[in-house]
Image (cartoon, grey):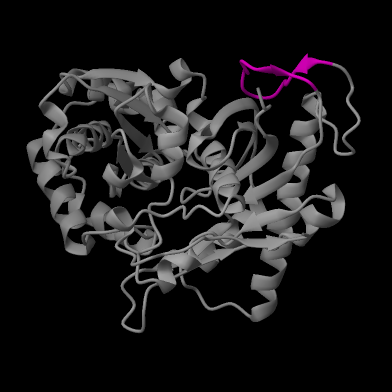
Amino acid sequence: MTEQRTRVVAGCMTGTSLDGLDVALVKITGTGLEMKAGLLGHHALPLPDGLRSTLMSLASGEANEPIVYMRAARALGELHADGIEQLIAYSSLSLEGEGRGEGEAQSTQSTNDKHNARKLDFVTAHGQTIWHAPRDDQGPKSWQLFDPWPIVKRLNVPVCYDLRQADLIAGGQGAPLTPIADWVMYRGKGDFICNLGGIMNSTRLFDKPAHIRASDDGPCNLLLDGLCQRFYEEAFDRDGLHASEGTYNAQASKLIGDAIHDVDRHGSKGREQFSDQWLNDLNARFANRFKPEDILRTVLWRISHSIETDGTDDLRRRKNRIVLAGGGARNKTLVQEIVESDAETVILSDDLGIPCEAREAMAFAVLGALSQDGIPISLPQVTGATDPGVSGVWAGV
């Protein structure tokens, strides 16, 4: 029997919430759509305050000199190199390809795969989206700010990045990109992957990639964290404790729904619609009429029920396994709300060996491997692209 090709890829993700960098070390066995992906380790580190505030400014459309963009891109690349080096230090992986013995990767997340130490093959990095304009009147555009060269220089490995452009130039919205990776990672294990990130997005899996359906469903952590910061001056509602003390309020729900409807359009979504100004305007609509904990609980109710109205009409026609991932899956009150509002089986991605926080970083490792194999990573029925081709720019090859 011919031995299958094996690659070790580091996938990196900084999301819409701008709360940190996630790095996943992934073992890819096989090639193309037949590949299998196993998590070797996961590491997370926060964005330095200065970098976070700069990226927030850039993503908010504030006026900045060109050097600010250049410095932010370089600092982001250096942070990625730091995160990858730290994860490799926790594992038995070697940058030089000289094994240090068999061992289990150790990181901020538990790992379930032992492997022989070997060389890191390449890195896939999403970069930081500072502006997403899929409906621009001169053609869809999106900017993932990133400088890959600190990784190339320090780790001596190629980097795959800028993964949305082939889809955008083909008329697609450039998002969501992870559904094909969800198919590789979760097929046969889950039916519906719900990522509770800054924006909630969902993937409905079927037996073939051509049948996959997916969508960006609306604000999740962008809304929850933004309100928590305004109500309590806390970065987020840890474990959903504040929301757990509240009750659903129909009037607040209507105000939230109207505010989302005012800016929401079908298709991909981002901080451009649900900005700080949007959050301030929404907060002004409340005008001290409701308890903060009731508002947060109502937001959770709306998020949980939006899973039922995301366009997957046949989701309720048979028993499904709904897999929750993303930072919002650590909000115990939100998970409880989803479980109570849903007749389906609801599990965490953790239960399938992929920590909730690692899902997106792992997905980008898979997307990089597909790109290397010449496989288009965006799905026309999801993004609207016509013949998107193979995405990804490679540095250091």
If the image is split into quadrants, where does the C terminus sit? Answer: bottom right
- Please check the rendered image and state whether residue 378 is part of the magenta-colored stretch, yes or no: no
Q: Is residue 396 left or right of residue 381?
A: right
Task: Decide if residue 269 is in sight here.
Answer: yes
Q: Quarter-wise, where is residue 64 in the image?
A: bottom right
Q: Quarter-wise, where is residue 380 in the image?
A: bottom left
- Name the residue at 87% across, 35% down: 97
**Outermost residue toward the bottom?**
138
Q: Is residue 147 left or right of residue 20?
A: right
201 and 271: which one is in front? 201
Q: Which residues are magenta?
A: 102-116
Residue 168's place in the image compared with 366, above or below, is below
- Name the residue at 59% across, 56% down: 127
- Name the residue at 37% across, 57% down: 270
137 and 369: which one is in front? 369
Residue 190: where, in percent of width, then height?
A: 34, 24
